[in-house]
Image (spheres, rainbow, N blue to C red):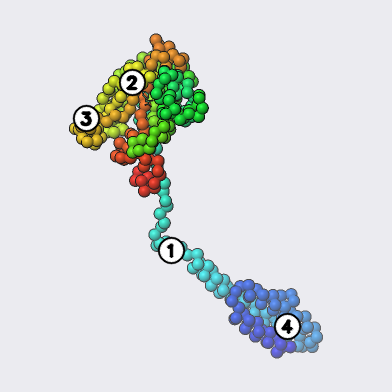
Amino acid sequence: MIENIDKIKATAIELISKALSTKELEEIRVNFLGKKGELTSVLKTLGSLSVEDRPKAGALVNEAKNSIEQILDETISNIKNKELNTLFLNEKIDITLPGRRGNKGSKHPLRKVLEEIEEIFLGLGFSIEEGPEIDTDFNTFKALNFQDDHPARDSQDTLYVNKDILFRTHTSPVQIRTMNKMHPEPVRIICPGRVYRRDAIDPTHSPQFHQVEGLIVDKDVQFSDLIGTLEIFAKKLFGETKKIRVRPSFFPFTEPSAEVDVTCIFCDGKGCGFCKHTGWLEVLGAGAVHPNVLRMSGYDPEIYTGFAFGMGLDRITALKYRVNDIRYFFENDIRFLKQFN
Ligand code: PHE
């Protein structure tokens, strides 16, 4: 029996020394020390020994059990350390590697300039209104005092959905919508948005482009308020050295009407090829709201006066960033758009 115990111990120790994982070692523990393990079965046979031999054999089994346990525990903790070390090594992050740059998006130039414009007018007490891109003939033309035979109403110029519904050709119908909603309260709004015209695409034209409309309706407002507002606007957007100039013009919904020019941004007014040596660039249309328009939208023209203006966002953005072809704004070429970060 003593031999047997020694053999069991030697086998166990050898197996332990060969084991590669904590799992294998736990199996060895069960096989040798567990309830049905080899040493336990030896213990069970102690009863067959003589009374003198029993304590000796018992002590031997215990000693074997203890040393197997001790070796097992040591080996397990060694292997655990090794396992942890390889785990840490595999999970190690090389913090000296340069990081990957995220592909950051940027604002579209039209959006950037629109936000600047909105900021300027919000600062002057305007609020922002929006209207649908598809509107009625009534809001787009009739309520804006267009005669029935006005060329803009021709399907050569306007995209119609049907006789009464069309793609708005300007943001001015939002004037009508806002006045209908607000009267007889005063109005001080800008409305940005997309507009559509049956134009062929070229460097300065597109069938879909953007406008920013402005409208003031109140009791004591005068033409000089409009000029003052537009002057502040031009200086803030294009630079403090800029001035504006007003030339007579015609729109069915304003009377008097004006084209508003700003000092040429290329030559600062000295005259260059871009401004055709005038020193001025045309940037917006404006005027006093026609009494018919006020009346049709619920304001008494004897009590209220109104001023409106409208500008092309694409043209203004092209001027501000010196882009010579507005088609770049619609093509979404990432190399172009990335320049406006
Ligand atoms: N709606 C005009 C256009 O599209 C611009 C404009 C707006 C003119 C408001 C005067 C007042 O050309």
* Residues packed near mark 2 inside 10 Å, few (<14), some (14 to 19) or many (20 plus): some
- Residues at discs 4 and 1 in contact (Cβ within 8 Å): no
Q: Depth check: give the residue in front, 221 or 277.
A: 277
Q: Depth check: give the residue in front, 20 or 274.
A: 274
Of badges 4 and 1, nearer the viewer stands 1
* Residue at disc 2, CB closer than 8 Å to ligand 1: no
Earlier sequence position, callout 4 versus callout 1: 4
**Residue 12, picture quadrant:** bottom right
| Quarter in which the N terminus is drawn | bottom right
Separation of residues labelled 3 and 1 (CA atoms) = 63 Å
Residue at x-position 41% and y-position 46%: 105
Q: Depth check: give the residue in front, 10 or 147.
A: 147
Earlier sequence position, callout 2 versus callout 3: 2
Q: Is residue 329 left or right of residue 66?
A: left
Q: Is residue 281 left or right of residue 62?
A: left
Hey, what amino acid is under mark 3? Thr
Earlier sequence position, callout 4 versus callout 3: 4
Of badges 1 and 2, nearer the viewer stands 2
Is any part of residue 67 visible from this angle? no
Hey, what amino acid is under mark 2? Phe
SS for callout 3: loop
Residue at x-position 38% and y-position 36%: 200
Image height check: is 300 above or below 261?
above
Q: Which residue is the site of mark 2?
A: 250
